[in-house]
Amino acid sequence: MSTLNNQTEQVKEISGVNPLKCMKCGKCSASCPSFNEMDIKPHQFVSYVQNEDIEALVNSKSLWKCLSCFACVERCPRDVKPGKLIDAARQIVIRQKGQDYLSPNEIPELLDPEIPQQLLVSAFRRYRR
Amino acid sequence: MQRIGVFVCHCGTNIAATVDVAKVAEMALNEQGVVHAEDYQYMCSEAGQAKIQAAIKEKNLTGIVVCSCSPRMHETTFREAAERAGLNPYMVEIANIREHCSWIHKDVEEATKKAVILMRAAVAKVNLNAPLKPGESRVTKRALVIGGGIAGIQTALDIADAGYKVDIVEKTPSIGGRMSQLDKTFPTLDCSACILTPKMVEVNKHENVTIYTYSEVEKVSGFVGDFTVDIRKKARSVDMDKCTGCGVCQEKCPSKKTLSEFNRGLNTRSAIYTPFAQAIPNVPVIDRDSCMKFQTGKCGVCSKVCQAGAIDYEQQDEIITEKYGAIVVATGFDMIKLDNYDEYAYSQSPDVITSLELERVMNAAGPTKGHLERLSDGKAPKEMVFIQCVGSRCSDDRGKSYCSKICCMYTAKHAMLIRDKYPDVNVTVFYIDVRTPGKNFDEFYRRAVEDYGVNYIKGQVGKVIPQPDGKLLVRGVDLIDNKQILKEADMVVLAAAIEPNPDVRKIATMLTASIDTNNFLTEAHAKLRPVESPTAGIFLSGVCQGPKDIPETVSQAGAAAVKAIGLLAKDKLMTNPCTAHSDELMCNGCSQCANVCPYGAISYEVKEINDHGVRETRRVAVVNNALCQGCGACTVTCPSGAMDLQGFSNRQILAEVDAICR
């Protein structure tokens, strides 16, 4: 339980999000381009964090289906920003694997024509120290 | 030497749970002049007041300190109780140990310490208090109502019916306000104009009511019972006495390109215009910014066609100065601008409209003569999508934090009316919550769902994407089915948040009425004085105080009228004796006090002064006690210490500070 709690606190700290502000309007899920690919939907991220079930988020498909396009972050009327929550859960996984560093030199070999440009920019923004 | 009694209130557990009240009473006995101290559960109760009165009589008290809630709450209560026991009411001081102490602290020991200090300061002040006698001021038996919408009309009618004179100042060329723009009203679906226009006629015909349309309040001075107001009557360019309201000028006016404010910019109007057919007064105005005569000097068609010779291009703005006893603010609301909501494509597609625009579209006198049609191509829509809470309930900086309250009901109304008149049109409503508290309100909403088949979807819309074929692709979510929805719509209607009329800031400043962060006027007490501003003599009617629908607005308008009538019915008001006065021996006539005085209460006199045997002619400050509100701005500004405030003298304040620092 304590580790779970810890993870919840970590997600809240990394994301800077207070999930209690959510009014469950669903605008995040209405905005998400990856909605159909996801097993846990963007508006559900918030309740998973509220219910301290980070384990489920970390093991979800959604973790890797989120494009970090930030449409949900942009449009959330309550400053809850589910995109930041899933982002934080992703970071927990990445940090556990010790992969939380990205140097510009490594980028060319990671390139894949299928990867959306936003993902690269977003990754670089996050993993550059 | 004063004989002071200290009374410590428990306020149930409000104070007693955090402050050791018995200790505060015990400590009070050590203070200078204190001859009596006690604590009691509810000092403001009948029994509590009786305790105070008994002590005043038995111990011959010359002053009392009540350690209780804020003086805003019960200062008057305790002053009146003391007065009934024969004590001058200004010998009563309140130590606020609730709002300033028990409510904001947790630690009992620390809070008790602070309560004792607050008590000490109050005792120190009472030691220097002197009995004060309030003066009297007269009441002008005339009320001003700012705003001529349904709120202002109802308030004016109620005050006028009670036999008092009322003036309405309305900014636009006609009274009627937002309600005149509506098509039907919930939950009865009566036509808005049919129930409003009789009231407009009634108020216009009432012998006690004077209406100034196309006019604005420019300056307010004075105080409760005796306000002096300058009203700017903007040049109408049409003589109100001569005009017969035939309308030929509007027909013949060649400049017809200005967007109609009344129709929310959905069509255009002429430069000389009345906002709508039932306008009161039925006298047009010339909008000088779009009139060719005023812009280029060429034209003058309206003057030529006017049989009554009413057109007057030379007319000037007129300033009317009038005295009022009471002022009611009824400035109403507007919808928020949707510039920051690009995702709904409001500025990209003419088929994405606000609910108020839909009211005009549905109205027989509107731009489409009441036919539901797309504004882009005039085609009848088959799929309509309504989006709720656009800009309401937002904690970001794009919208408003509050619920606009009326949208759930008017959307149900729109949906129902459309399904009734056009059964082949599918109507979908995306909602977060449906909020329908009110008599027959939820039944109304359920009728829309059950009898009219309106499709309510719990979820929001993320984006509206205009398609090349003119359709609108709506991407939303159904949170119950946990599915994303893509829907092609012909029209999208946005329930945009409402906000107070932007002019209200200016008006509130003139009235020194307080206003909240959302520009709603603040009431004197949220529960017990909901139609009064904390500024005496100013009353609140309608949406300027908070979002409300028509029935609520009308009730509140009546309540504001009753409060205004209660004031106007008095012949005289007691004035606050805590006013400033200047010591002419110390005054050097520098004018700094007059510059900071918000009430214009300070003037200067040149007089002969005997300064310790030296006779000199000096310029000295003189305070008009009727105008002074006792704010104290002058006393802290005065460089020579000549200005002092009765009841809050420099000596008293410093004694309080000393007691706190002791």
Image (spheres, rainbow, N blue to C red):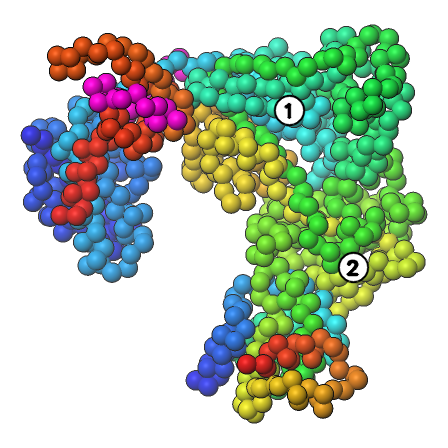
Kindly identify which chain the residue marked by label 1 belongs to: B
Pick whichever, B190 or B326, lies toward us. B326
The crowding category of the residue bearing disc 2, from other C-alpha atoms within 10 Å (few below 14, some 14 to 19, many at least 20), is many
B576 in the magenta segment: yes
- Badge 1 density bin: few <14, some 14–19, many ≥20, Cα 10 Å: many
The answer to whether residue B226 is left or right of residue B12 is right
Indicate whether B83 appears above or below B403.
above
Q: Which residues are magenta?
A: B570-595
Q: Is residue B182 above or below residue B629?
A: below
Q: Secondary structure at mark 1?
A: loop
Inspect the image, locate mark 2, and give the three-letter code of the amino acid beneath it. Answer: Val
Write down the residue under mark 1.
B170
Q: Is residue A25 shown in magenta?
A: no
Figure check: B82 above or below B474: above
Is residue B653 visible in the rendered structure shown here?
A: yes
Q: Is residue B449 visible?
A: no
Q: Earlier in the sequence, mark 1 or mark 2?
A: 1
**Which quadrant would residue B370 be assigned to in this image?**
top right
Does dot 2 land on a helix, a strand or a loop?
Answer: strand
Residue B471, x across and y down, in percent: 88, 57
In the rendered image, the quadrant that contains the N terminus of chain B is: top left
Question: Where B30 sits versus B167, above or below?
Answer: below
| CA gap, disc 1 and disc 2 | 38 Å
Name the amino acid, label 1: Glu
Q: Is residue B366 left or right of residue A92?
A: right
| Residue B433: quarter of image | bottom right
Q: Position of residue B223 (x, y in %)?
A: 42, 22
Q: Which mark is residue B464?
A: 2
Task: State the residue at coordinates (80%, 24%).
Answer: B295
Query: Which percent across, then down, holds residue B392?
Result: 62, 51
